[in-house]
Image (cartoon, grey):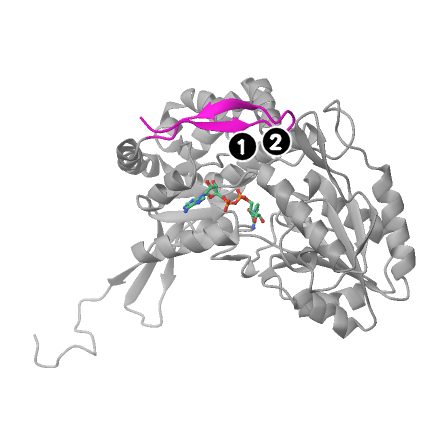
Amino acid sequence: MTKPIEVRNPRTGKFDYVIIPPPSKLLVQQCKRTRRAQVRWQQLGLEGRIEALQQWKQAILSGRDRLTEALVNDTGRLSISVLEIDSFLSSIDRWCRLAPELLQESAKNTAIPFIALQQTSVPYPLVGIISPWNFPLLLSTIDTIPALLAGCAVIVKPSEIAPRFVAPMITALNAVPKLHDVLTFVEGEGATGSLLIENVDLVCFTGSVATGRKVAEAAAKRFIPAFLELGGKDPAIVLESANLELATSAILWGSVVNTGQSCLSIERIYVAESIFEKFYHQLVAKAHRLQLAYPTIESGEIGPIIAERQAAIISDHLQDAVEKGAVIHCGGVIEDLGGGWWCRPTVLTQVNHSMKVMTEETFGPIMPVMPFSRVEEAVSLANDSIYGLSAAVFASEAEALEVAYQIDAGAISINDAGLTAMIHEGEKNSFKFSGLGGSRMGAAALKRFMRKKAILMKTNATNDPWWFENGE
Ligand code: NAD
């Protein structure tokens, strides 16, 4: 029997849920069983797999209330949980619609007329998915759906900080026997994730850089692909030509939605010095209008900080900034309300790159604003980071495009924020320490679960010109 893990409720601070990680032996057996079942799943063909996924979707819809309740208890937020479930369900439809074209195989001519090529792809048998707590459902399923459609079997290890949503997902899975054998959720902490990597054929990891490094090392030892989606410190650059009203609204949303607990949150803002004062006054005024979703969950826009350890990180970054001369204009404290940790939208000025709040991932609703005098300086500040997840630029279209091309990040939103979370077509890589491996967006998101296989066939009955002349 493994040690039970108690799970904290982010609104009450009470440990009101328990998970029990599987003993190592059982997990290894589970991986073997799931890999064996993959053969039938692949043989089922794409149509059969689509049908099974649609049945799962229907089963989830029938138990939607329970799933919502679990996710709300995991994250302490309501509207975003509803959105998360909607996005997950629509991703099933989207991938079911796209997969037939993406998985089409074809015969091709080669440069040599008597050699025919059949280009095929073979799924990795067993994919392991390890996910974080900030969007527990979405980030456990974002890679799962395309992997399943590609023909892989999948074992998901969600975060131990927000695991309540797993039970209703399993209930829905039980209604779809064909899928039940090839999709499993296992509960546990790092040790369970680490053992999973030892027993799968490909790993998709979403989480911190520190853990990502361990995952990459473990996968490298086994020569299995590791797709890593890690942290970020997304910059926003606001040029003089920007529409200020639009920029402040978009940046506020992009920084504090989900209480800033999003990998692609805007975490640092560089503003042309000619509009700097006006910009931050407007941002502060708009930030003041947002309310905590407390005491009732239906009220306000800002939910609690989900992971207790994150509250300490936010607090540390704020303290470090103030000690080095930053000025806080609103928010700026971690409040203990009803046992949960809360932080109101916080605007800081007098910031610089000696501060953690400008260089390390804060993962909170914190908006440090820094002026720049020349566009080149803004680009250089934006690129002065170990991260390269995404970024935003606010300016006239031509100017913004010129800046966008110079930013070292995988996705750039122009005159908007976080677009890569909404627009699934745009393929992107995570630059620098923000990740490794193929794009999780666009067609590549599905194709990366397949290994390419070239079947080359000689179609004539004469000796090839490169054979030994005397070798008949
Ligand atoms: P984390 O790295 O602490 O944990 C992520 C997952 O890894 C958890 O399920 C955890 O149990 C597991 N884990 C821990 N040690 C492991 C090990 N040695 N081997 C295998 N698995 C292990 O991250 P977190 O705090 O849960 O999530 C927050 C981080 O995730 C932030 O840095 C955020 O930026 C990042 N994130 C990135 C994206 C993206 O798409 N780039 C999206 C969301 C979150």
10 Å crowding of disc 1: few (<14), some (14-19), many (20+): many
Q: Please state the horizontal and vertical placement of residue 445, each as a whole percent of the image.
A: 50, 50
What x and y, as percent, mark residue 63?
54, 18
Residue at figure coordinates x 76%, y 51% from the top left? 367
Give me the residue at 48% from left, 56% from top.
438
Q: On the picture, is 292 further left or further right than 41?
A: right
In the picture of the structure, the residue carrying the numbered disc 2 is: 75
Q: Which residue is most to the bottom?
A: 469
Q: Judge by depth and name the residue closer to the eye, 297 or 7.
A: 7
SS label for mark 1: loop
Tell me which corner region of the image, top left, top right, bottom left or bottom right, holds residue 194. Answer: top left
Instruction: Indicate yes or no whether the magenta region holds residue 13.
Output: yes
Tag 2, which secondary structure? helix
The magenta stretch is 1-22
- Nearest the viewer among 272 and 184 is 272
Residue bearing mark 1: 162
Instruction: State which quarter of the image contains the C terminus.
Output: bottom left
Using residue 252 as the reference point, say whether residue 148 is left or right of it: left
Q: The residue under label 2 is which amino acid type?
A: Thr
Disc 1: residue Cβ within 8 A of ligand 1's nearest atom: no
Q: Residue at x 36, y 53 (%)?
A: 219
Residue 185, percent from left and from top: 42, 31
Residue located 64% across and 30% down the image: 81
The amino acid marked with disc number 1 is Ala
Mark nearer the N terminus (2 vs 1): 2
Q: Do the residues labelled 2 and 1 touch (CB within 8 Å)?
A: yes
